[in-house]
Image (tube, rainbow, N blue to C red):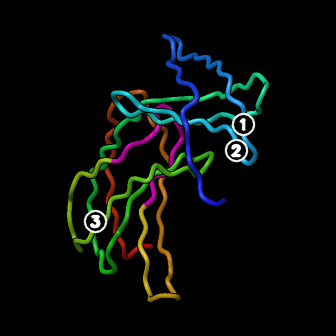
Amino acid sequence: MCGSRSQEVATAYTDENGDYSITFNYKLQEGERYTFSEQYYGFPYYPEYLNTIDIAPGKTNTININAWKPIELKLNVTVLNNVNPPLMIRNEIDASNTSFLNTENIYDENISKTYTLRSKPDTDIKIIFWYYTGTNPFLTLHKKTYLYHTTLEDVNTLDYTIDCSTF
């Protein structure tokens, strides 16, 4: 049998400290395994799993999750000489190269505009501007990276002038 199916066998809610406990008695059939699925309520927090999720039947299992509320990066960007659009902007956690899957695409050759990305608070990040030249399969990546340490403020505002002819 290929594919997957799921069946809820237990539900838990965190307490005021973010701790939870699940107890259930479900006998796995051959080829089945336990998995973990979280559900967001309210503002979407980002989960970071601090260990791999491998639930061993018949044992006490611990899953450590660091959940945090994203901050906004307000990027006031002046773009010059964007003759190979799109110029793209993203941010990554510096230590892990983890991206937040939020990217802005800029098609104007010259523009000043504010772009908003989400990021992790109080963390070293990379803000990356990039574009490609050439045609498939011979694309050339042009990239400029800025290091920044986010604060605990809900909004971090930064100013950049990006001249695409310089990278």
Residue 29 at x, y = what percent? 72, 41
- Give the answer, above or below, for where 39 lies relative to 81: above
Name the residue type under label 2: Glu
Q: Are marks 3 and 1 in contact (CB under 8 Å)?
A: no
Residue at position x 35%, y 69% in the image? 87
Q: Is residue 103 left or right of residue 11?
A: left
- Magenta segment: 117-128
What residue is pinned by disc 1?
28
**Residue at the disc numbered 2:** 32
Q: Is residue 85 above or below residue 16?
A: below
Residue reaching furthest to the top? 16
Residue visible at 64% across and 27% down in the picture: 64
Q: Which residue is mark 3?
A: 79
Inspect the image, locate mark 1, and give the three-letter code of the amino acid beneath it.
Answer: Leu
The circle on residue 7 is none
Q: Is residue 138 above or below residue 47?
A: below
- Alpha carbon separation for disc pair 2 and 1: 6 Å
Q: Which secondary structure lies at badge 2? A: loop
Q: Between tags 3 and 1, which lies in front?
A: 1
Q: Secondary structure at mark 3?
A: strand
